[in-house]
Image (cartoon, helix red, strand yellow):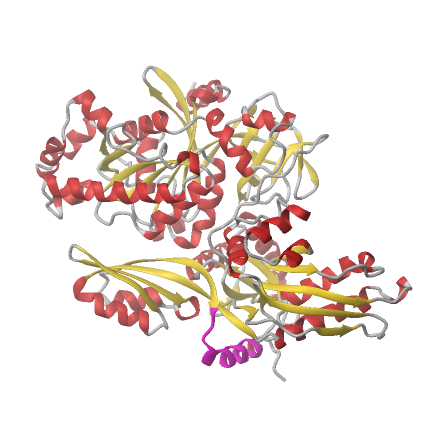
Amino acid sequence: MGRREKMVSKIVKLMDRPEQIRNMGIVAHIDHGKTTLSDNILAGAGMISQELAGQQLYLDSDELEQARGITIEAANVSMVHEYKGQDYLINMIDTPGHVDFGGDVTRAMRAVDGVVVVVCAVEGVMPQTETVLRQALKERVKPVLFINKVDRLINELRLTPEEMQKRFIGIITEFNKIIKSMAPKEFKDAWQVRVENGSVAFGSAYNNWAIDMPLMKKTGITFKDVIEYNEQGRQKELAAKAKVHEVILNMVIEHLPNPRVAQKYRIPHIWQGDVESEEGKAMLNCDPAGKLAIMITDLSIDPQAGEVATGRIFSGTLKRSKEVYMINARTKARTQQVGVYFGPERMPTEYVVAGNIAMITGLKNVRAGETVTEVDSPIEPFEEMRHTSEPVVTVAIEAKKTKDLPKLIEVLQMKAREDPTLKVEIDEETGEHLLSGMGELHLEIVTHRIKERGIDVKVSPPIVVYRETVAKTSPQIEGKSPNKHNKFYFVVEPIEEPAFKALVDGDIKPMRVKGKELGKAFEAHGMAKQDARGIVEVYENNVLTNVTRGIQYLNEVIALIQEGFHEAMDNGPLAKEKVLGVKVKLVDAKLHEDAIHRGPAQVIPAVRDAIREAMLQADAMLLEPKQKVFIHVPQDYMGAATREIQSRRGQIIDLRQDGDMSIIEAKCPIAEMFGFAGAIRSATEGRALWSTEFVGFEKLPAELQEEIIKKIKKRKGLLT
């Protein structure tokens, strides 16, 4: 029996012992050492050679990842680790740190119950660290902390033990502050990390060593010894005594929850159904004999095996060749292979049970976010995954050769299924394929993937997606149907600020609460009672509400009114951009008594045109997407960095010093950020570290409104 087969048989043995399972992710800011740490963990589990750990970047199996030195897609691996004489099954996901691939982190968080957050000892808690930690806490995923690159504090910065301690305390305090502000109420204190209980470890993933309090007590190694080993260049000796994979995996087993514990508090948060029902209880208890409940968190397309889905099994047992039902796709499918991951390799097994992360093939047309269940008795679907960013950068992509067009359409549709943060639209008028992503890098990678398939494509320069909204309340506007027999009266106004914020932040969940409950939620966030009680639907963060009373036949046309509302919200009156944050009130209507005179061709245009006109009367304006930009730069280059920000219409929000480094926090329009990477590099001679985070849409300055509207119309061919 080979090493792999032995590992698989061990994994299968442990699979149905939830107490001995840990589902964990590794998350961090870009370049803080996640993948290097993952390598070490794999080497420790005997999957790759110890010498190559940290240099092989085994989980960055993709040539593009290796060429750029970054993780682009989350990678999964299952392994066995012995702790205190007992074997444990660890299902691990290594996630990307670049902000453009934040969608992968969000999806990975749904699959795991705990995370190791890697923070660089030199740079400390960075913006993206905060973002990934926030994503974890939102999904009720428990964090522990690994402070990496400690060797750099000793060998490069030559800090004294006191200075090092001060730096560590600073990182831990900041980390705990985020947990305190973001964690669910019942975990604000329980999830604080502490050196003394071993939920914080220190080390160097690159040099294969780590220490924490339990190891120091067990071996007698002190911080003073660590400094000596580093200064004398004896890091290999240290690595033999303080193995990084042992310290990290011991910490994971000791401090992160097993699936049975985690599902008790995670299920009520991520599943919309009744937790007291039979299937609800099966999920809470992680019951392998319960109804099948799987959330698909990731999808990749393999040229040989076809669609390979990754899913977290919350209850039930998934067997090979089992017929299952996909709730969102409303279709049945039969599994071909099921099993576990070994990084880039897949290891088939006969079955995978509740509490594990499974590899599944055979689910045709599945998407990330899908709920997979039993054929005869489907369950409520899982809560939609909310991504922290939005696809706001768009490129037009077309095949150079006409014969490649069907292939291009197929690849684009496949990419959109693999990556829900990617939007693919076909511009009906120009026939172009519009690809929207999180940023320049995101789209660059997707374009590269398309070219890898042998399709020669022409890609336009990236453009930014705007939104349209209104500044005030409109007068009452009448919309007449083409046959003049039906009239609709609308008033349009901005959604109240607190209600809109709650909608964007996910505190109001239109997908989950309906009817009176939805009205109450809006009312609690400041919407007028009558408007809130009349809500018909929430569409793309806009609200349609019916405040009329006793109008005959209205119920029969309400679906058509919604259709007209959708059309108006998808194509705003200024430049046919999507609408955001608008409340549309139906205040009156006069309808023909004969149903034949109030069909779709009469109602939809009347509603759509009236809403558009009302928006114009309510001072319609454009909103532009903004991002926060965080720059760490030596003081001598601070002026150059701030000038670079200001030349891009950026506002400096905060400027502070940390030793000899300046930390600049600014807010910039995404439209002005193209080419920023090269510009900031040359302005600071490559000395700046920077990252960005999407912060939503804000009003475009008045003096630019007309010019940008003109540009968009010209691009869309709307100018006559």
**Magenta residue check for 511:** no
Residue 11, percent from left and from top: 45, 22
Q: Residue at x 10, y 33 (%)?
A: 224
In the displayed structure, does residue 602 sit left or right of residue 689?
A: right
Q: Residue at x 56, y 52 (%)?
A: 416
Asked if residue 28 is positioned above or below residue 701 in the image, the reply reads above
Hey, which quadrant is residue 544 in on the image? bottom right
Looking at the rendered structure, the number of numbered marks drawn on it comes to 0
In the displayed structure, does residue 161 sit left or right of residue 574?
A: left
In the displayed structure, does residue 151 sit left or right of residue 453?
A: left
Residue 291, percent from left and from top: 64, 26
Write the start and end of the magenta stretch as one range: 699-714
Q: In which quadrant is the C terminus drawn?
A: bottom right
Hey, which quadrant is residue 61 in on the image? top left
Give the dominant element type of the magenta stretch: helix, strand or loop.
helix
Q: Residue at x 47, y 78 (%)?
A: 702
Asked if residue 240 is positioned above or below residue 396 in the image, the reply reads above
Hey, which quadrant is residue 167 in on the image? top left
Q: Is residue 407 at least partly visible in the picture? A: yes
In the displayed structure, does residue 703 sit left or right of residue 336?
A: left
